[in-house]
Structures are given as structure tokens and as C-alpha cells.
Amino acid sequence: MILTINGQAREINQVGTLADLLAQLQLSPERVVVELNGEILCADQLGANALSPGDKIELVQFVGGG
Amino acid sequence: MKIYLNEKPAEIDAGMTLAELVASMKPDADVRIINGHPVAAPDILLQQDDRVTLIKRGEIPSFEDLEFLLTTRHTPLIHQQLKTKHVGIAGVGGLGSQVAIALARSGIGSLTLVDFDVVEPSNLNRQQYFIDQIGLPKVSALAENLRRINPYVKVTAHCEKVSEMNLCQLFGTVDLLVEAFDDAGQKAQLCRSFLQHFPDRYLVAASGMAGYGTANRIATKRINRRFYLCGDDTSAARPGHGLMAPRVGVVAHHQANAALRLLLNLEPETDNDDPDN
């Protein structure tokens, strides 16, 4: 299905949830802020919501240092 | 004849000397500066439009005087807006200590500082602390440093760990939060919690600043209307690729500038909306 990830339309297959998407993109859920269609999600919500074609997703990955 | 005395216009008689001015306006002044140059000989003749600064060493200006001095170097309207604003800073290490100082110098009204760390020798490579502050709680040391810069910023310091439990109590009244943690997981956790709990407040976070690669990759990026991220996105701190003062400072000042722009209702990512650009 087509998802808009960080403003870019991408064809993503074999993912049911945001948890699956992060795994496919090799992103660690603890270090990523996930926004789905304008709503910020808790870490434990990532496996709960099924993704639908056209969903707009922002993934903000943090690296250490400060 | 018009001159400027401590930034304010003043009318004096033509032919007046510096010594006469000092005697009539500030007899205890022990530092006398004319047009940016310290003057030792007091019998110098004052000229039209001279800018004279008279200082008594160690004297702390009154709130009104300091505010006036700050306002003359800022755009007055901007100073009036910033002094009503309250910024929270979560973590006062390399990022937070420098953001706090930049905001205090800019005349922000209130700062809330939260960190549970104490100053360690290894912090001095990039954090705004001094060798005689080793062992002090960072928030206490920073509050003291801020007081020495601008004693009229209202500083609230909490030496504790930020958690989901105390987030609302610590930062419930801020207009904007600066995320200035070190650990990637804690950064993400704080951002998630703050964005969920405070749907109408601004958040300026940071990611990617280690090493000494070009600073030109560091930028301020808009994630959404109220969430901004500063850094190069990728340079993680790791053994052999440590945190160094210049790049951490660049990111901290991106955060401080983004905070100022948001508080002034300007877009941080571009300056298309800025009448001066």
C-alpha cells in the first residue's frame, strides 16, 4: 500500500501496523517519535492500530548526545 | 549639547569635561568609557553625541536600568514580548546550559530548569559550568551563572529526574519546552509525553551533534506546527565520536533561536515571514 512517510509517498508492503513498519525500516521504537495522521502515539500504541492506504506518518528518530 | 550617558540622551553645557560630568552625575564611577574606549584622563573635553558609560565596579544595576540597557540593544517590542514568556528546559548539560544562557541574555522572563545530574569534570569540555562548580547540582550551578548574567530572569530550578509522573507539575506553565537530554530513548520519550499532554505548547528538540564534522549540516527542521528538531539528524555520540563544544553549541543556539522565533510568532525554519528579511 502507499503511505506518506515524512512527506514522501512510499510503496510499503507486508506491514499491518506501525510496529511492523518500524521493524521493516529497522528503526528502534524507543528512539522514534511517531505521528499518525497528525496524532502523536505512545510506544505501546504502535502495535495496536492497523495501517490504511494513504496514512500520513511522521517518524522522528533520535540519536544520542546533548 | 546632547550626549548619551549610560545609553540615555542627556543635555550638557558645551565645554564640559568628563571629570565635571562624573562629579555631577556619578561621583563614585571608577570606570569611564567614551564611545567604546576606556578613558584614563578625566579632563577630556566632551563632544556632541559622545556616548559615555560610567560604571562603578561591582555595582549591580537596578531592574529598571538593566532592562533599559538590554532594551536599547534589542528591538524594544521584542523585549517587551520576551519578558512575558516562560521556557522550560529539560536537561541542563551541553545543550540546556547554553540554551538557558542564550535565552537569559535575550531577556526571557522565566526559565524552569530540570536535571538530576551534578557537575563532573568531564562536563567542562562543552557545558557552561566552571571548575569551582564541580560537584554542585547542575541546576543550582546554572541558576547561579544565570543570576550573574541577568539577575532579573525568574529562574526555577528542580534537581530531579523528569518522568511521565511529574511532567505536568514541572512544565505545566511553560509556553515552550526545550528538550535537552543526552540519551536518545529519553529524548523520544519526553517528546512523546510532552506533545500528548500539552497539545497547544511548543517543543524544540535536538538530535545529531557529535564529533567535529562540518557544522553546515546542522539545521532547524519543522516536524509540525509546534514541534521542531535541531541538529544534523545522524551524528550520534559514541566511543571515538564524542560530544564537543562547537557543534553542541551550534545545535543549542539553533534551539534557542527557534525558541525565540516561536515565542515571537515567527516561523523558525524560514524567515520569509520576517519583515526584516
Image: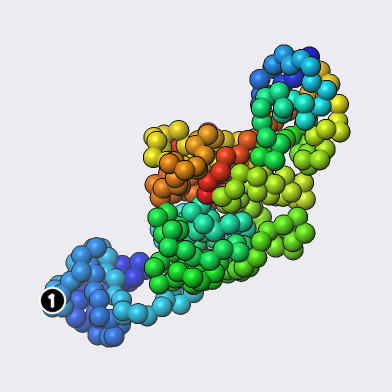
Q: Which image quadrant for residue B229? A: top right
Is A36 or B127 nearer to us in this picture?
B127
Q: Is residue B114 left or right of residue B13?
A: right
Q: Position of residue B191 (x, y in %)?
A: 68, 46
Is B31 or B11 nearer to us in this picture?
B31
- For the residue marked with disc 1, what is the amino acid? Ala
Instruction: Note whether residue B221 is visible.
Output: yes
Is B211 or B62 nearer to us in this picture?
B211
Q: Which residue carries the number 1 mark?
A: B41
Instruction: Note whether residue B254 is visible.
Output: no
| CA neighbours of label 1 inside 10 A, class few (<14), some (14 to 19), many (20+) | few
Q: Position of residue B248 (x, y in %)?
A: 46, 47
Whether residue A46 is situated above or below residue B254 in the rendered picture: above
Q: Is residue B189 left or right of residue B130?
A: right
- Residue at the (68%, 58%) spot, across then down: B162
Q: What chain does mark 1 sit on?
A: B
Whether residue B269 is situated above or below residue B45 in the rendered picture: above
- Residue at the (58%, 57%) spot, across then down: B91
Q: Which image quadrant for residue A43? A: top right
- Residue at the (70%, 40%) spot, across then down: A30
Is B36 or B91 nearer to us in this picture?
B91
Q: Is residue B30 left or right of residue B116?
A: left
Q: Position of residue B61 (x, y in %)?
A: 42, 76
Image quadrant where one finds the N terminus of chain A: top right
